[in-house]
Image: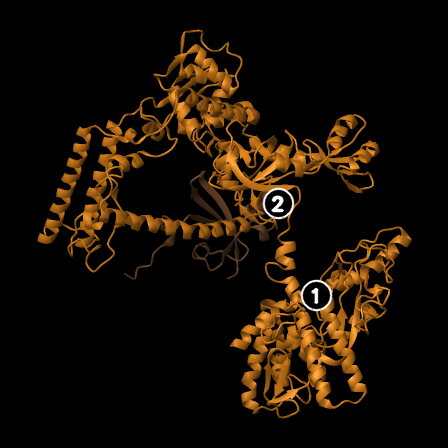
Chain colours: A brown, B orange
Amino acid sequence: MNKKIDIKKHIFVPKHQKLSEKEKEDLLRKYNITTSELPKILKSDPMALSAAAKTGDVIKIIRNSPTSGKSVFYRVVVNG
Amino acid sequence: MEEEEKLEVIEEQEPAEAVAEEAELEEVKAPEEKKETIEAEIPIYKKVKDVQFGVLSPKMIKKMASAKIVTPELYDKEGYPVDGGLMDIRLGVIDPGLKCKTCGSKLKECVGHFGYISLARPIIHLNFTSVILTLLRCSCRECGRILIEQEKIDKFGEKLRQFGKEKGEEIMRKKVKDIIASTTGKTGGKCPHCKAKQHKIAMDKPTTFFEDEKRISPIEIRTRLEKITDDDVELFGINSKSTRPEWMVLTVLPIPPVTMRPSITLETGERSEDDLTHKLGDIVRINQRLFENINAGAPEIIVEDLWDLLQYHITTFFDNEVAQLPPARHRSGQPLKTLTERIKSKEGRIRHNLVGKRTNFSARTVISPDPMLMINEVGVPEIMALKLTVPEKVTSWNLEHIKKFVEKGPKKYPGANYIVRPDGKKKKLTEETIEQALEELQPGYLVERHLMDGDLAIFNRQPSLHRMSMMAHKVRVLPYKTLRLNPAVCFPYNADFDGDEMNLHIPQTEEAMAEAEILMLVQTQLISPRYGLAVIGCIQDSISGNYILTQKKFQIKREEALDILMQVGISDMSKLPKKELVTGKEIFSMILPEDFNYSGRSKSTEEPELLIENGKLISGVMDKNNLGEGSGLLLRNIHKKYGEKYAVDFIGKVFRLGIAVLMKRGFTTTVSDTDLPEKVDGDIKHLLDVSRQEVNDLIRSYKEGTLDSFPGRTLRETLELKIMEVLNRARNEAGLMVLKNADRNSHTMLMALSGARGTTINLAQISATVGQQALRGKRIDKGYSLRTLSCFEKNDMGPEAHGFIKNCFKKGLSPSEFFFQAMVGRDSLMDTALRTPKSGYLYRRLANAMQDLKIEYDYTVRDASKRIVQFVYGEDGIDVSKSEAGKLNVKRIIKEVSGE
């Protein structure tokens, strides 16, 4: 019973990817924003931990959406 | 504990007080600035950098005052305000014609100026008692230092300040108290700085302080507060620059300007003073007496008595509802309304005047339906039209036209109520002034004429949860006394006519009218931004009418068809086939545009395929699926192809067509509509008997133990589920039998089939069986021990004993069945009554939380500070109000692009 569950494989957990520095720059330029305008994700979030993200990194989340099939979301990693 | 609670309450009032004082302070400064402005002819604009709240210092009070008040007299023998009295003309003007002695401006221009009184003895300010108590308890009675050791202050000071910034000063003060409570234990009740012994300080509400049972006078309190150093004051979370603790004990009292306590002249010529003036009069009088007694060297008891009286008057001046004090009263016995009462509660300034502003040019009354109105019209009773006015500018072109209104005056419709001269002076029209007004009237004037047909009005029904809850309508002035609306717009307003009232607002400027017309007119709101379908459609009998009309068998003489079409408002009959008999579909096609194509589905099972080709209804019946509000794409497509103006016209025509058909044909409903053939009655009885037997078998097998339980369920639960299933099946089958055997042309059935009103379940309940009554998804299982009602045997698990109603409504229910039905009925009634306000509040919070989310040009959804909430609106970027039910119809777009 003490087997560790890999949450990444759970069907309710959408795909999380860490963006490279360049991709992050492009994203910020595309929306003409700084990271403070992005939605946040805690550094201690299990999915942020599993992506080994540092504060200030941007994580791309690909979800299934009832309206558009797939939807892309970005979150910036914050302390906590 | 009680004390702490009180502390919070009083503290809450402090900022409000401070705001008031601060604001008043600003007002005093304003006139000076005005003077400069007039001299320099350059307006001075100042930007508010920040706002600080604090307590007024005696110095400040004197500085902002323009008069010292020394006498309780108000007017001299000639009725002129006494100098140094409470109505001193230096405090502002309230009489027309007089000029303010301080700023020189006239009535309404002068905002008023503060005065002050020097108090003979210090007085505790009621709203600061809790802070004073904390300060007294937490500082040394000898040296005035805070009762915390220096090292600890150094150690925790910064932390405490940080804490105060984050959590608020209130909590910081509490924290200081806690720290002191923990240190006094160690120091043995001695000041850690000067080692002086500290005594227990208590407060007797509202304003008396005790030290070891001995009363401390406000003078003593004030000297102690003075001793607290600025650095220590900061530790209590008080900004020593804006607020010194000793200022919380009053030595001078600001007198509010007369403009905020104007006297009224009664019809008898007598003056009646404001409550505040009365109260201030008391204060000044007692203060004078106190002065005199002190100067005359009166015995201490007399002085103290007067002092207490002054304290009482000043306390009630701030708040006349202090629990421990008897409220100050008028001679008539009604309590005075002093400062706090002016601000707080429902009738106070905030909720009554600021949040609850009321508007002119608005009306409210009961609504009733009028299907002969256009959908974008509202019927306004004539009495309302006589009071509601529209300002119309007089020009040389419309002068004669407008004179006609003025001639009629305010009592004859359509007339006018006021004329406004170019300088802004308003003149009321009466029988006597009409003649003069007519002579005077010339271009540049404004005439407020009565509301007329075609004027714009904004119509609203609460709760306004939608943007469709407020729509602009064109006015139609009608006789009688209700507001009238086309029943088709009931749905967006969620209105019915069981006594609902609605509000009407008349826009008063060209800008407002244009905005209302372009953005709010009914046709602009046709498509719901929530689901992208028409929110206005046919309801009730207009659905029944169109259903009858478009049925296959409907045929009618050509003349009669012409009658109907004329009623709808169609005069060009060239499209109608020239035959003796015309079909209903041909009549319906008359209102369809000629190049319209559509295919969809009907609710009906007889002709489910709806097909319109080149403006001809080929097959299918019109029913709720196509004409109803919030369903079907027929109305949506017409709106898309022909525009909103055409779409409302179309809906209006369909609506009237349905009604016209029913008028021609007749439509009613009777009990016999739901009669079933005798054989069917027997079949239903048999069906129920079989089900009863099945349930009995289940119960027997449960008792014998041969019943297999479902996985994860107990045996008992399994039995319940199986019984429920059997009984539900019985009810559904009975419903189907009714549907199959009832007369499909009976009007009751027709309404259910077309979706106009009622469902087939309702029909089955009337003519077959009411079915199982359920409480929270289970059979009824409440009441006596081991049984629901005392007429059943204990442990009876049969259908009858647990709320199965085998009778139908028409046959009548047995007493126990009736009781079960009442149980469920009461339960659902309670449920709706309790749920409505809860869900309403939930919706309100949601709406408020999301009110400033906005879609930017890059399709992102952002909040007010431009933070991203969604990267693509709705994740698909579709504007629902421009879509078809939230989706893009790719097929149709390709067809349109390639085909045309």
Can you give x and y, in whole percent of width and height, for residue B541 in the image?
A: 42, 28
Q: Which amino acid does label 2 sit on?
A: Asn
- The residue positioned 58% from the left and 79% from the top of the image is B177
* Figure check: B490 above or below B126: above
Q: Mark 2 points at which residue?
A: A32
Distance from the alpha carbon under mark 1 to that under mark 2: 60 Å
Of the numbered discs in the image, which one, if any, rests on residue B275? 1
* Figure check: B650 above or below B7: above
Crowding at mark 1 (Cα within 10 Å: few <14, some 14-19, many 20+): many
Can you give x and y, in whole percent of width and height, for residue B439 in the image?
A: 83, 32
Q: Which amino acid does label 1 sit on?
A: Asp
Corner quadrant of residue B630: top left
**Closer to us: B111 or B500:** B500
Q: How many marks?
A: 2
Of the numbered discs in the image, which one, if any, rests on residue B552? none
Can you give x and y, in whole percent of width and height, for residue B339 in the image?
A: 68, 66
Q: Is B207 left or right of B682, judged from the image as shown? A: right
Q: Is B691 left or right of B349, judged from the image as shown? A: left
Q: Which residue lies furthest to the front in this view?
A: B268
* Figure check: B17 above or below B695: below
